[in-house]
Image (cartoon, helix red, strand yellow):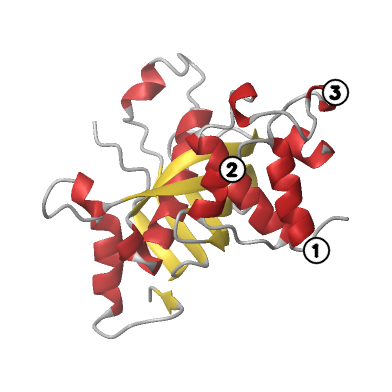
Amino acid sequence: MRFLFVDEILEMEPGRRIRASKFISPDEDYFHDHFPGFPVVPGVLLTEMMAQTAGKCLDAEDAHRGKAMLARINVASFRDWVRPGQTAVIVGEVRTSRSQFATANCHIEVETRTVCSAELLFSFVVMENFAPGYRDEVLARFKASQGPGASGRVRTP
Amino acid sequence: MKWFADLFGLPIANVTPATARTEITDWDSLGVLTLMAALDETFDLVVDDADMRAMKKVGDVLDLLRKNGKIT
């Protein structure tokens, strides 16, 4: 099982805001247990989607301070179920971004309805801790789609 | 004081300026980041790592806020 909970970055202003999407495949393993006859995405995975999304926005801002890692969930609430076959649109708004930490307000929309939200705190881990050549494939794909020299607010066609 | 107690989820009766960092379980490395973020966002006060490390008790945080004119 991969632990990638973002399919595609739809729009991003590095270090400020991001919108991304994740299709919830009916084939996900966890639906066997969560729950039989009532498959819904676990709240911890929705939180991970928000953390990964906001993390990409922070990583795109400044690679030198390291990779953004979820350090604390200040507040999280879950208002509605997310079901197989739906597409989650994940929105992250960076509140504060410093060299040692960052905070972001995030939420997930399904069919324009907000299903959950969270306030997250991130710390940074220097890239030397990761495997040589490691890179965020979703972020790399988004950057490639923008073409060389793209900066500031960028949007997919 | 209430702000500090709320930040670490402590009863306000348990927090005084003399309360040491070592007495607050959550004032660990993550607590330091939490405190830095809260000072930044609540008081618009950016604190560097050295200043944070120098804080040994609640009163040190209050002193920093006073020194920067954030509380009286």
Task: From the image, state whether disc 1 or disc 2 is nearer to you.
Answer: 1
- Label 3: chain letter: B
Q: Residues within 10 Å of mark 1 (few under 14, many from 20)?
A: few
The residue tagged 1 is: B69
Q: In which quarter of the image is the C terminus of chain A?
A: bottom left
The residue tagged 2 is: B34
Residue beneath the point at 37% across and 81% down: A151
Q: How far apart are marks 3 and 1 (CA)?
A: 25 Å
Residue at the far right: name it: B72
Q: How far apart are marks 2 and 3 (CA)?
A: 21 Å
In the picture of the structure, the residue carrying the numbered disc 3 is: B13
Taking A141 as reference, is A54 above or below it? above
| Residue A69 location, quadrant | top left
Disc sitting over residue A12 in the figure: none
Q: Earlier in the sequence, mark 1 or mark 2?
A: 2
Q: Estimate the x, y position of residue A84 in percent, counting from the top left.
A: 44, 34
At label 1, which amino acid type do we have? Gly
Residue appearing at x 24%, y 31% in the figure:
A1
Check disc 2: other Cα within 10 Å, few if <14, some if 14-19, many if 20+.
many
The chain letter for the residue carrying disc 1 is: B
